[in-house]
Image (tube, grey):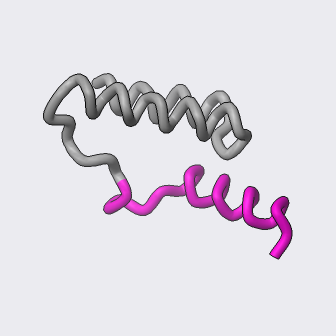
Amino acid sequence: MTTAAINHQMRERHAHPHPASSPPPMAGGDQLADQLARLANLHSTGVLTAAEFAAAKARLLS
């Protein structure tokens, strides 16, 4: 499988997440910061679009 195909599958997975794949409730600020950093990394590497990143970040911060 090519890198492009893997990236496409990852984007599809994030665009249509399974309900059980929602992030767990946050217990503290460190965990929140870690999850935000992971999201930022996914966005910067092209796995998440700007809209997907914004939506995921909003879910974490709400």
Q: Residue at x 56, y 30 (%)?
A: 40
Q: Judge left or right: residue 4 versus residue 35.
A: right
Image spot of residue 47 (x, y percent): 67, 46
Q: Closer to the camera, 36 or 57?
A: 36
Q: Residue at x 46, y 35 (%)?
A: 56
Classified by dominant secondary structure, the portion drawn in magenta counts as: helix
Q: Residue furthest left?
A: 27
Q: Is residue 5 magenta?
A: yes
Q: Residue furthest bottom?
A: 1
Compared with 27, 23 (above or below) is: below
Image spot of residue 24 (x, y percent): 24, 47
Q: Quadrant of residue 28?
A: top left
Q: Residue at x 56, y 52 (%)?
A: 14
Boundaries of the magenta span = 1-21
Task: Count how many numbered circles sit on residues in the image.
Answer: 0
- In the picture, which quadrant includes the N terminus? bottom right
Image spot of residue 30 (x, y percent): 26, 27
Image spot of residue 59 (x, y percent): 36, 32
Compared with 16, 62 (above or below) is: above
Q: Residue at x 28, y 24 (%)?
A: 62
Compared with 55, 3 (above or below) is: below
Q: Judge left or right: residue 50 versus residue 58.
A: right
Q: Judge left or right: residue 5 versus residue 29.
A: right
